[in-house]
Amino acid sequence: MMNFNEKTLHKESIYEGRIVDVSVHDVELPNGKTSKREIINHPGAVAIIAVTSENKIVMVRQFRKALEKELLEIPAGKLEENEEPENSAARELEEETGYKTNQLTKVTSFYTSPGFADEIIHVYETDQLFEGVTYTDEDEFVELVEVTLDEAESLIKEEKIHDAKTIFAVHHIKQQRAQANLKND
Amino acid sequence: MMNFNEKTLHKESIYEGRIVDVSVHDVELPNGKTSKREIINHPGAVAIIAVTSENKIVMVRQFRKALEKELLEIPAGKLEENEEPENSAARELEEETGYKTNQLTKVTSFYTSPGFADEIIHVYETDQLFEGVTYTDEDEFVELVEVTLDEAESLIKEEKIHDAKTIFAVHHIKQQRAQANLKND
Protein backbone atom coordinates (compact mmCIF):
# COMPACT_ATOMS: atom_id res chain seq x y z
CA MET A 1 0.00 0.00 0.00
CA MET A 2 1.36 3.42 -0.95
CA ASN A 3 1.75 6.16 1.64
CA PHE A 4 -0.24 9.22 0.59
CA ASN A 5 0.12 11.19 3.84
CA GLU A 6 0.03 14.96 3.51
CA LYS A 7 2.12 16.68 6.15
CA THR A 8 0.97 20.08 7.38
CA LEU A 9 3.70 22.68 6.81
CA HIS A 10 1.60 25.59 8.06
CA LYS A 11 -1.90 25.86 9.48
CA GLU A 12 -3.92 29.06 9.40
CA SER A 13 -6.98 29.24 11.61
CA ILE A 14 -9.72 31.12 9.72
CA TYR A 15 -12.70 30.90 12.04
CA GLU A 16 -13.68 29.34 15.35
CA GLY A 17 -17.44 29.12 15.50
CA ARG A 18 -20.15 27.72 17.70
CA ILE A 19 -20.39 24.54 15.60
CA VAL A 20 -17.57 24.53 13.06
CA ASP A 21 -13.93 25.60 12.99
CA VAL A 22 -12.35 26.50 9.65
CA SER A 23 -8.65 26.28 8.84
CA VAL A 24 -6.38 26.19 5.80
CA HIS A 25 -3.38 23.88 5.78
CA ASP A 26 -0.37 24.21 3.52
CA VAL A 27 0.55 20.56 2.97
CA GLU A 28 3.45 18.66 1.49
CA LEU A 29 2.21 16.15 -1.07
CA PRO A 30 3.65 12.65 -1.64
CA ASN A 31 5.51 14.01 -4.71
CA GLY A 32 7.19 16.75 -2.64
CA LYS A 33 5.06 19.57 -4.05
CA THR A 34 2.82 21.68 -1.86
CA SER A 35 -0.91 22.39 -1.94
CA LYS A 36 -3.62 23.94 0.22
CA ARG A 37 -6.36 22.04 2.06
CA GLU A 38 -9.44 23.81 3.38
CA ILE A 39 -10.63 21.94 6.47
CA ILE A 40 -13.89 22.17 8.42
CA ASN A 41 -13.74 20.69 11.92
CA HIS A 42 -17.05 19.60 13.43
CA PRO A 43 -17.76 18.03 16.86
CA GLY A 44 -19.46 14.98 15.32
CA ALA A 45 -23.10 14.02 15.37
CA VAL A 46 -25.56 11.27 16.18
CA ALA A 47 -28.58 10.03 14.24
CA ILE A 48 -31.32 7.71 15.41
CA ILE A 49 -33.21 5.07 13.44
CA ALA A 50 -36.37 4.80 15.52
CA VAL A 51 -39.28 2.55 14.60
CA THR A 52 -42.66 2.79 16.34
CA SER A 53 -44.85 -0.09 17.52
CA GLU A 54 -46.87 0.48 14.30
CA ASN A 55 -43.66 -0.18 12.29
CA LYS A 56 -43.35 3.44 11.23
CA ILE A 57 -40.04 5.24 10.86
CA VAL A 58 -39.72 8.34 13.01
CA MET A 59 -38.63 11.43 11.07
CA VAL A 60 -38.56 15.16 11.57
CA ARG A 61 -39.19 17.97 9.15
CA GLN A 62 -37.02 21.02 9.71
CA PHE A 63 -35.69 24.08 7.93
CA ARG A 64 -32.04 23.80 6.95
CA LYS A 65 -30.52 27.22 6.53
CA ALA A 66 -27.55 25.90 4.52
CA LEU A 67 -30.03 24.67 1.89
CA GLU A 68 -32.67 27.41 2.38
CA LYS A 69 -35.37 24.74 2.50
CA GLU A 70 -37.03 22.15 4.70
CA LEU A 71 -35.78 18.57 4.77
CA LEU A 72 -37.33 15.36 6.03
CA GLU A 73 -34.67 13.54 8.05
CA ILE A 74 -34.25 10.99 10.80
CA PRO A 75 -33.68 12.65 14.20
CA ALA A 76 -30.08 13.81 14.57
CA GLY A 77 -27.95 16.38 16.27
CA LYS A 78 -24.43 17.32 17.10
CA LEU A 79 -22.49 15.94 20.04
CA GLU A 80 -22.22 18.25 23.03
CA GLU A 81 -18.83 18.60 24.69
CA ASN A 82 -17.78 15.45 26.60
CA GLU A 83 -21.06 13.76 25.75
CA GLU A 84 -21.13 10.01 25.03
CA PRO A 85 -22.70 9.40 21.59
CA GLU A 86 -25.31 7.01 23.01
CA ASN A 87 -26.45 9.58 25.58
CA SER A 88 -26.50 12.19 22.86
CA ALA A 89 -28.68 9.95 20.69
CA ALA A 90 -31.22 9.39 23.49
CA ARG A 91 -31.27 13.13 24.22
CA GLU A 92 -31.70 14.21 20.59
CA LEU A 93 -34.43 11.64 20.00
CA GLU A 94 -36.46 12.93 22.93
CA GLU A 95 -35.79 16.63 22.22
CA GLU A 96 -36.83 16.37 18.58
CA THR A 97 -39.62 13.80 18.68
CA GLY A 98 -40.84 13.43 22.26
CA TYR A 99 -40.01 9.71 22.19
CA LYS A 100 -37.87 8.29 24.98
CA THR A 101 -35.96 5.04 24.83
CA ASN A 102 -33.69 3.12 27.14
CA GLN A 103 -32.56 0.65 24.51
CA LEU A 104 -30.31 2.00 21.78
CA THR A 105 -28.15 -0.27 19.63
CA LYS A 106 -25.16 1.05 17.70
CA VAL A 107 -25.52 0.50 13.95
CA THR A 108 -22.37 2.10 12.53
CA SER A 109 -20.50 5.38 12.21
CA PHE A 110 -19.65 7.15 8.97
CA TYR A 111 -18.05 10.31 7.65
CA THR A 112 -20.33 12.58 5.67
CA SER A 113 -17.95 14.79 3.66
CA PRO A 114 -14.39 13.48 3.99
CA GLY A 115 -13.17 15.75 1.19
CA PHE A 116 -13.38 18.85 3.36
CA ALA A 117 -14.93 18.07 6.77
CA ASP A 118 -14.26 15.68 9.65
CA GLU A 119 -17.91 15.32 10.64
CA ILE A 120 -18.70 11.76 11.70
CA ILE A 121 -22.23 10.52 12.39
CA HIS A 122 -22.76 7.77 14.94
CA VAL A 123 -25.97 5.93 14.07
CA TYR A 124 -28.12 4.15 16.66
CA GLU A 125 -31.37 2.24 16.32
CA THR A 126 -34.29 1.34 18.53
CA ASP A 127 -37.82 -0.01 18.26
CA GLN A 128 -38.43 0.41 21.99
CA LEU A 129 -40.08 3.81 22.24
CA PHE A 130 -42.23 5.36 24.90
CA GLU A 131 -43.71 8.83 25.12
CA GLY A 132 -41.54 11.56 26.59
CA VAL A 133 -41.76 15.32 26.36
CA THR A 134 -40.55 17.45 23.42
CA TYR A 135 -38.35 20.34 24.43
CA THR A 136 -36.21 21.32 21.45
CA ASP A 137 -33.32 23.76 21.73
CA GLU A 138 -34.64 27.30 21.81
CA ASP A 139 -33.35 27.91 18.26
CA GLU A 140 -34.60 24.61 16.80
CA PHE A 141 -38.04 24.07 15.25
CA VAL A 142 -39.01 20.59 14.13
CA GLU A 143 -42.19 18.73 13.20
CA LEU A 144 -42.61 15.01 13.88
CA VAL A 145 -43.47 12.88 10.82
CA GLU A 146 -43.93 9.09 10.88
CA VAL A 147 -43.77 7.12 7.63
CA THR A 148 -43.98 3.49 6.61
CA LEU A 149 -41.03 1.83 4.86
CA ASP A 150 -42.97 1.90 1.56
CA GLU A 151 -43.66 5.61 1.96
CA ALA A 152 -40.02 6.27 2.80
CA GLU A 153 -38.85 4.41 -0.31
CA SER A 154 -41.24 6.43 -2.48
CA LEU A 155 -39.98 9.66 -0.91
CA ILE A 156 -36.40 8.65 -1.77
CA LYS A 157 -37.37 7.90 -5.37
CA GLU A 158 -39.03 11.32 -5.64
CA GLU A 159 -35.93 12.89 -4.04
CA LYS A 160 -38.11 14.25 -1.25
CA ILE A 161 -35.93 12.35 1.18
CA HIS A 162 -32.43 13.23 0.07
CA ASP A 163 -29.94 13.37 2.82
CA ALA A 164 -27.29 10.73 3.35
CA LYS A 165 -28.14 9.56 6.88
CA THR A 166 -31.87 9.24 6.17
CA ILE A 167 -31.32 7.24 2.98
CA PHE A 168 -28.92 5.05 5.00
CA ALA A 169 -31.63 4.52 7.62
CA VAL A 170 -34.25 3.47 5.07
CA HIS A 171 -31.84 1.05 3.36
CA HIS A 172 -30.88 -0.36 6.75
CA ILE A 173 -34.48 -1.04 7.77
CA LYS A 174 -35.24 -2.56 4.39
CA GLN A 175 -32.31 -4.97 4.63
CA GLN A 176 -33.18 -5.86 8.21
CA ARG A 177 -36.76 -6.75 7.27
CA ALA A 178 -35.61 -8.69 4.20
CA GLN A 179 -33.33 -10.78 6.43
CA ALA A 180 -36.11 -11.31 8.99
CA ASN A 181 -38.39 -12.51 6.16
CA LEU A 182 -35.71 -14.91 4.91
CA LYS A 183 -35.46 -16.43 8.39
CA ASN A 184 -39.24 -16.82 8.57
CA ASP A 185 -39.45 -18.53 5.16
CA MET B 1 -47.38 22.01 7.58
CA MET B 2 -45.76 24.67 9.75
CA ASN B 3 -43.48 27.29 8.25
CA PHE B 4 -40.05 27.11 9.84
CA ASN B 5 -38.24 29.50 7.49
CA GLU B 6 -35.31 31.40 8.96
CA LYS B 7 -34.89 34.81 7.35
CA THR B 8 -31.34 36.18 7.07
CA LEU B 9 -31.13 39.55 8.85
CA HIS B 10 -27.39 39.94 8.27
CA LYS B 11 -24.78 37.84 6.47
CA GLU B 12 -21.08 38.03 7.24
CA SER B 13 -18.71 36.44 4.73
CA ILE B 14 -15.89 34.78 6.68
CA TYR B 15 -13.83 33.09 3.97
CA GLU B 16 -13.93 32.53 0.22
CA GLY B 17 -11.74 29.54 -0.56
CA ARG B 18 -10.80 27.37 -3.48
CA ILE B 19 -13.43 24.77 -2.56
CA VAL B 20 -15.59 26.13 0.26
CA ASP B 21 -17.02 29.51 1.24
CA VAL B 22 -17.82 30.17 4.88
CA SER B 23 -20.40 32.66 6.15
CA VAL B 24 -22.34 33.40 9.32
CA HIS B 25 -25.97 34.44 9.09
CA ASP B 26 -27.94 36.23 11.78
CA VAL B 27 -31.40 34.76 11.31
CA GLU B 28 -34.89 35.48 12.55
CA LEU B 29 -36.48 32.32 13.97
CA PRO B 30 -40.15 31.33 13.63
CA ASN B 31 -40.74 32.55 17.20
CA GLY B 32 -39.34 36.01 16.39
CA LYS B 33 -36.07 35.50 18.27
CA THR B 34 -32.69 35.61 16.53
CA SER B 35 -29.86 33.11 16.23
CA LYS B 36 -26.65 32.54 14.28
CA ARG B 37 -26.14 29.95 11.53
CA GLU B 38 -22.67 28.96 10.37
CA ILE B 39 -22.90 27.99 6.70
CA ILE B 40 -20.41 26.21 4.45
CA ASN B 41 -21.09 26.60 0.72
CA HIS B 42 -19.65 23.91 -1.54
CA PRO B 43 -19.89 23.58 -5.35
CA GLY B 44 -21.42 20.09 -5.14
CA ALA B 45 -19.91 16.76 -6.06
CA VAL B 46 -20.38 13.60 -8.06
CA ALA B 47 -19.78 9.98 -7.09
CA ILE B 48 -19.71 6.94 -9.34
CA ILE B 49 -20.88 3.40 -8.61
CA ALA B 50 -18.81 1.48 -11.15
CA VAL B 51 -18.89 -2.31 -11.43
CA THR B 52 -16.34 -4.22 -13.53
CA SER B 53 -17.03 -7.14 -15.87
CA GLU B 54 -15.85 -9.39 -12.98
CA ASN B 55 -18.65 -7.92 -10.81
CA LYS B 56 -16.22 -6.01 -8.63
CA ILE B 57 -16.93 -2.57 -7.21
CA VAL B 58 -14.40 0.07 -8.21
CA MET B 59 -12.99 2.01 -5.25
CA VAL B 60 -10.08 4.30 -4.54
CA ARG B 61 -7.91 4.60 -1.49
CA GLN B 62 -6.83 8.14 -0.70
CA PHE B 63 -5.56 10.31 2.11
CA ARG B 64 -8.18 12.66 3.51
CA LYS B 65 -6.54 15.60 5.22
CA ALA B 66 -9.71 16.52 7.15
CA LEU B 67 -9.52 13.09 8.83
CA GLU B 68 -5.71 12.73 8.82
CA LYS B 69 -6.08 9.21 7.46
CA GLU B 70 -6.72 7.18 4.33
CA LEU B 71 -10.24 6.18 3.33
CA LEU B 72 -11.55 3.61 0.90
CA GLU B 73 -14.29 5.28 -1.15
CA ILE B 74 -16.09 5.06 -4.45
CA PRO B 75 -14.64 7.49 -7.03
CA ALA B 76 -15.90 11.03 -6.46
CA GLY B 77 -14.96 14.61 -6.92
CA LYS B 78 -16.28 18.12 -6.87
CA LEU B 79 -18.09 19.76 -9.73
CA GLU B 80 -16.02 22.18 -11.77
CA GLU B 81 -17.59 25.52 -12.67
CA ASN B 82 -20.36 25.19 -15.27
CA GLU B 83 -19.78 21.44 -15.53
CA GLU B 84 -22.73 19.10 -16.03
CA PRO B 85 -22.77 16.48 -13.25
CA GLU B 86 -22.77 13.59 -15.75
CA ASN B 87 -19.68 14.93 -17.52
CA SER B 88 -18.06 15.48 -14.15
CA ALA B 89 -18.79 11.87 -13.17
CA ALA B 90 -17.20 10.50 -16.35
CA ARG B 91 -14.18 12.76 -15.88
CA GLU B 92 -13.65 11.88 -12.21
CA LEU B 93 -14.04 8.17 -12.89
CA GLU B 94 -11.34 8.25 -15.55
CA GLU B 95 -9.02 10.58 -13.61
CA GLU B 96 -9.13 8.49 -10.46
CA THR B 97 -9.37 4.95 -11.80
CA GLY B 98 -8.35 4.92 -15.44
CA TYR B 99 -11.75 3.49 -16.41
CA LYS B 100 -13.73 5.21 -19.14
CA THR B 101 -17.43 4.84 -19.74
CA ASN B 102 -19.97 6.27 -22.14
CA GLN B 103 -22.96 4.93 -20.28
CA LEU B 104 -23.75 6.56 -16.95
CA THR B 105 -27.16 6.29 -15.30
CA LYS B 106 -28.28 8.72 -12.61
CA VAL B 107 -29.06 6.96 -9.33
CA THR B 108 -30.00 9.83 -7.01
CA SER B 109 -28.68 13.00 -5.39
CA PHE B 110 -28.34 13.59 -1.68
CA TYR B 111 -27.11 16.18 0.79
CA THR B 112 -24.25 15.06 3.01
CA SER B 113 -24.33 17.50 5.96
CA PRO B 114 -27.48 19.61 5.80
CA GLY B 115 -26.93 20.94 9.32
CA PHE B 116 -24.06 23.16 8.23
CA ALA B 117 -23.17 22.61 4.54
CA ASP B 118 -24.99 22.72 1.21
CA GLU B 119 -22.86 20.00 -0.40
CA ILE B 120 -24.95 17.76 -2.64
CA ILE B 121 -23.61 14.56 -4.22
CA HIS B 122 -25.01 13.42 -7.55
CA VAL B 123 -24.58 9.66 -7.81
CA TYR B 124 -24.21 7.82 -11.13
CA GLU B 125 -23.75 4.16 -11.92
CA THR B 126 -22.28 2.09 -14.72
CA ASP B 127 -21.20 -1.45 -15.45
CA GLN B 128 -19.91 -0.51 -18.90
CA LEU B 129 -16.23 0.18 -18.32
CA PHE B 130 -13.28 0.21 -20.66
CA GLU B 131 -9.67 1.06 -20.01
CA GLY B 132 -8.69 4.71 -20.18
CA VAL B 133 -5.69 6.55 -18.81
CA THR B 134 -5.26 7.73 -15.22
CA TYR B 135 -4.25 11.35 -14.92
CA THR B 136 -5.28 12.62 -11.48
CA ASP B 137 -5.15 16.28 -10.54
CA GLU B 138 -1.61 17.28 -9.70
CA ASP B 139 -2.49 17.47 -6.00
CA GLU B 140 -4.47 14.23 -5.85
CA PHE B 141 -3.00 10.79 -5.09
CA VAL B 142 -5.24 7.76 -5.30
CA GLU B 143 -4.85 3.99 -5.50
CA LEU B 144 -7.34 1.82 -7.38
CA VAL B 145 -8.93 -0.99 -5.31
CA GLU B 146 -11.55 -3.43 -6.63
CA VAL B 147 -13.67 -5.42 -4.19
CA THR B 148 -16.51 -7.92 -4.39
CA LEU B 149 -19.87 -7.10 -2.82
CA ASP B 150 -19.14 -9.58 0.00
CA GLU B 151 -15.78 -7.95 0.68
CA ALA B 152 -17.39 -4.51 0.67
CA GLU B 153 -20.03 -5.62 3.18
CA SER B 154 -17.35 -7.01 5.48
CA LEU B 155 -15.39 -3.76 5.20
CA ILE B 156 -18.51 -1.82 6.24
CA LYS B 157 -19.06 -4.14 9.25
CA GLU B 158 -15.42 -3.60 10.31
CA GLU B 159 -15.90 0.19 9.79
CA LYS B 160 -13.05 0.12 7.25
CA ILE B 161 -15.49 1.50 4.72
CA HIS B 162 -17.15 4.33 6.58
CA ASP B 163 -18.15 7.20 4.45
CA ALA B 164 -21.74 7.94 3.54
CA LYS B 165 -21.57 7.75 -0.26
CA THR B 166 -19.63 4.47 -0.29
CA ILE B 167 -22.01 2.77 2.14
CA PHE B 168 -24.85 4.05 -0.05
CA ALA B 169 -23.17 2.49 -3.10
CA VAL B 170 -22.77 -0.91 -1.44
CA HIS B 171 -26.40 -0.93 -0.22
CA HIS B 172 -27.55 0.10 -3.69
CA ILE B 173 -25.68 -2.73 -5.42
CA LYS B 174 -26.91 -5.23 -2.85
CA GLN B 175 -30.55 -4.25 -3.36
CA GLN B 176 -30.12 -4.28 -7.14
CA ARG B 177 -28.73 -7.82 -7.07
CA ALA B 178 -31.43 -8.99 -4.63
CA GLN B 179 -34.10 -7.68 -7.02
CA ALA B 180 -32.41 -9.33 -10.01
CA ASN B 181 -32.34 -12.63 -8.10
CA LEU B 182 -36.04 -12.32 -7.25
CA LYS B 183 -36.84 -11.88 -10.94
CA ASN B 184 -34.77 -14.94 -11.80
CA ASP B 185 -36.43 -17.14 -9.18
Image: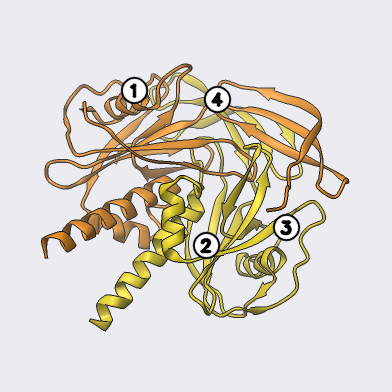
Chain colours: A yellow, B orange
Q: Quadrant of residue B34?
A: top right
Residues beneath discs 2 and 3 located on the same chain:
yes
Q: Chain of mark 2?
A: A
Measured in 3D between alpha carbons, the distance from the residue under mark 4 to the one under mark 3, in whole angstroms, is 28 Å
**Residue B165 location, x and y as percent?**
41, 45
Residue extending farthest to the right is B33
Residue occupied by mark 1: B87
Residue occupied by mark 3: A81
Badge 1 element: helix
Residue occupied by mark 2: A123
**Disc 1 to disc 3: CB gap under 8 Å:** no
Q: Indicate whether B128 appears above or below A70.
A: above
Measured in 3D between alpha carbons, the distance from the residue under mark 1 to the one under mark 3, in whole angstroms, is 42 Å
Q: Residue at x 72, y 52 (%)?
A: B2
Residues beneath discs 4 and 3 located on the same chain:
no
Q: Chain of mark 1?
A: B
Residue occupied by mark 4: B19
Measured in 3D between alpha carbons, the distance from the residue under mark 2 to the one under mark 3, in whole angstroms, is 18 Å
**Residue B145 location, x and y as percent?**
25, 42
**Residue B136 location, x and y as percent?**
33, 23
* Other residues around mark 1 within 10 Å, as few (<14) / some (14–19) / many (≥20): some
Q: For marks 2 and 1, give the one nearer the viewer.
A: 1
Q: For marks 1 and 4, give the one nearer the viewer.
A: 1
Q: For marks 2 and 3, give the one nearer the viewer.
A: 2
Q: Residue type at mark 2?
A: Val
* Other residues around mark 4 within 10 Å, as few (<14) / some (14–19) / many (≥20): some
Marker disc for residue B13: none
Badge 3 element: loop
Badge 4 element: loop
